Amino acid sequence: MTSKAFDNATDANRQQGGRRNLIINGDYKINQRGNATGVTGAVYRGPDRTLIVESSDGSLDVAQNTSGVLADTGHGQSLKIDVNTADASLASNQYFFLWYLIEGQDCQQLQYGTANAKPVTLSFWIKSNKTGTYNLNLRSYDPNRMLGGSYTIDSADTWEYKTITYIGDTNTALPNDNGAGLLLDWVFAVGTDFTSGTSPTAWEARTNADRGADTTVNLLDNTANYVEITGVQLEVGTVATPFEHRSYGEELALCQRYYEIIGLAGSGDIVIGGYANNTTHYVTFQFKTEKRASPTVTKNGTWSTGGTGASQPGVFTVSKILFRGGMSNATGPGNVYAQNDNTGCNFTADAEL
């Protein structure tokens, strides 16, 4: 009996076993937060795991687009970012980045910090009205190191497929914990503080001057500008394989590790508990997915309590948070938290990187 080792290039299309894509929601099918307009600052907005990092005189609209996406490649949704307020003249220290962060413990297979550090290949579909060259760096968040990369949009308003291969970092290991490990650093608009260097072809300490050294475009310079992305895949090796489609339910659970909505908008009971006395009662709630870390829980909408006594204003605080759920307390008699309006009533649990 003879055996044959797989050749990565020859067998890329038929060796599809196991989880390959290090990116969650790379086809942007999950959009728990909903679309957002006038986005500024460093915030998660729009489709899950989308971190906008922006500091300029402009603003952005961030949305899940479901119209005119690449149905022939199996992609029914995309991330679409439109310029809401333009900034045609960036100050030297202004910028617009798009980040994707990966937990350090999910990067250990890359063996960074050893002689066996593995390369990774990023593939994605992109469309924009702004042709030109854009940087897309691979960075280690902790320690703060970077490797340059770039791609070119050749034709306006046309879906184009791009791949970038990054060598492994033999110098410095990634943390083996639930904090940030690797990050993708998409560069869409930067001032001269980020363009005066040289895009690094070897791993180096993060240098801002190098991050946008190849970028020729200011995506923020006109309100007609946009960028649309889908099919983002980061995988071990030097070959981009076909996108790893996962079911909606599986992708949702992966996203809920970082962000979850508990309850739906509209009138009705959401969580049930019991009262300790006439002025205080408690409820516990369970997350659908264990969180990456102890999350920030926020109450949204107008609430009331009811059940044991007369309805009282739903003034309550979250008294304890765990990875799997938490406990809240409120004033007033009752043993049920109930929604008393028809829009926006829920808890949100945020454990993003």
Image: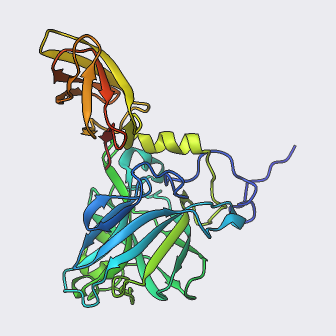
Task: Please state, as top left, top right, bottom left or bottom right, where the N terminus lies in the image.
Answer: top right
What residue sits 25% from the left and 75% below the top?
A: 207
Residue at 50% x, 50% y: name it: 30
Vertical order, 294 against 328 (above or below): below
**In the figure, is residue 20 to the left or right of 336?**
right
The image shows residue 189 at horizontal and vertical percentages of 33, 81
Using the image, determine if residue 165 lies above or below residue 195.
above
Q: Quadrant of residue 243?
A: bottom right
Q: Residue furthest right?
A: 1
Q: Residue at x 30, y 71 (%)?
A: 204
Residue closer to the observer: 98 or 117:
98
Where residue 332 sits in the image (x, y, percent)? 15, 19
Position of 275 with respect to 231 (left or right) is: left
Q: Where does residue 220 sit, x and y in percent of width and height?
A: 34, 82
- Nearest the eye: 305 or 326: 305
Q: Looking at the picture, does residue 39 appear above or below residue 201?
A: above
> Nearest the camera: 279 or 139?
279
